[in-house]
Image (tube, rainbow, N blue to C red):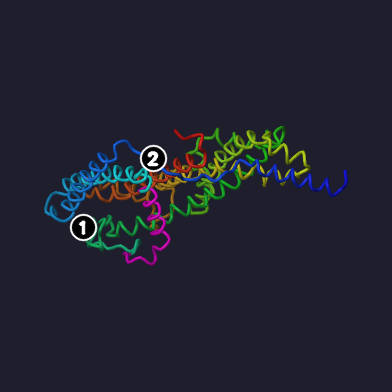
Amino acid sequence: MPSSIRECAVAEAERAAAATVLIEPIAPGPGLPVQNPARQRMLGIACLVPGVLIVLLALFVLRSTDATWRTFIGFIGFGLMFAGTQALGRVRWGATFSVGLWLAIFWLALVLFCAIFADLLPIDSATKADIPRRLERPALEWSQPLGRDTFGRSNLSRVIYGARTSLIIAGLTVSLGLIIGSIIGLIGGYFGGAIDYILNIFVNSTLAFPPLILLISIIAVFDPSILSISGALIVLSIPAYSRIMRAQTISLRQREFVLAARSMGASTRRILIKEILPNAMLAVAAYTFIQAAVIIVAEGSLAFLGLGIPPPKPEWGAMISTARNNLRVAPHTFFVPTIVLFVAVIAANMLGDALRDTLDPTLRD
């Protein structure tokens, strides 16, 4: 065969092999239409309008009423608003529309924005004590919308700066855990044999050790700081990423496009980076938000146990731990950081589930 014809054949085979890569853009497409849209629209309006009125009533009209009753009434209004928005959204965008997912995205974006630009926001200091104003209840005033803690510090400021601490630790942990764990899983899953066995010794040893004991042991050796806490959490996050990447690599290494690339003489490096890694990263990327939620809970648990960032730097877990002694006297000091932490974790989990369903169509209902 002449060399020019052979080169054309090889080039054509390479293009065919590249075309078999599994990654395909997932078009959002229109959602499934709802049944009886007119009825759904009327139901949405019937829930949304009273919900807005009840929330406004709780915020501005019933200011002299007990805070517990105002909160209860406000939750009823928010529930009606949620149901009405969900019904109207499904009429407009289809039966797969989820107002909860959009609220989760909005909440995470708000937390991220406040954490990044906390120094530019018109809020009080998060560390400066104001003893005469200690344990002030939340009020419809910008100076204390979430009240003040036992030292008179603004709960709003401490929640925002605490979000910065949690997001920095979660970002470092997820990014480095993702990189290191993916490399271990990719190499072990592709080569197998002795290399996979040696790498699994580290992974299985970490999984066999109680997570909380391992965290306390690592942090006990070093002084609590963002780097030491992140390092301890990275050690715990590597096995999860490694196992997901290893499972994906094992399932992909014998696929047709990998065999075609290998038969054409592609190097091992090219097969790993160009063929297997982009396809295997889909499942790993979908796990990132779920892992971030786990990291936020773990970091808050360490702070609750007194192993977090030393005071006066704010942390959600430390705020909860400090406020538990004043639960009856000033319940807002306990519930404010607890609700913020709870909603952030729920939102991250919802976004992770949605991302997983989008990247892996086989998991859709």
Give percent across and percent down for residue 280: 60, 41
Q: Nearer the viewer, residue 309 or 242?
A: 242
**What residue is pinned by disc 2?**
96
Residue in the image at 43% along x and 61% along y: 116
Residue in the image at 49% along x and 45% along y: 27
Q: Secondary structure at mark 1?
A: loop
Residue in the image at 44% along x and 42% along y: 354
- Would residue 265 appear left or right of 112 to someone viewing this image? right
Q: Main secondary structure of the magenta part?
A: helix
Give percent across and percent down for residue 112: 41, 56
Q: Give the quarter of the figure containing the C terminus.
A: top left
Q: Nearer the viewer, residue 80 or 57?
A: 80
Q: Amino acid at mark 2?
A: Thr
Q: Nearer the viewer, residue 47 or 73?
A: 47
Q: Which mark is residue 139?
A: 1
Residue 350 found in image quarter: top left
| Label 2 Cα neighbours within 10 Å, binned few <14 / some 14-19 / many ≥20 | few
Magenta segment boundaries in residue numbering: 103-124
Give percent across and percent down for residue 23: 59, 43
Q: Secondary structure at mark 2?
A: loop
| Label 1 Cα neighbours within 10 Å, binned few <14 / some 14-19 / many ≥20 | few
Confirm or deny contact between disc 2 and disc 1 (CB under 8 A): no
Give percent across and percent down for residue 64: 11, 54
Q: Which mark is residue 215?
A: none
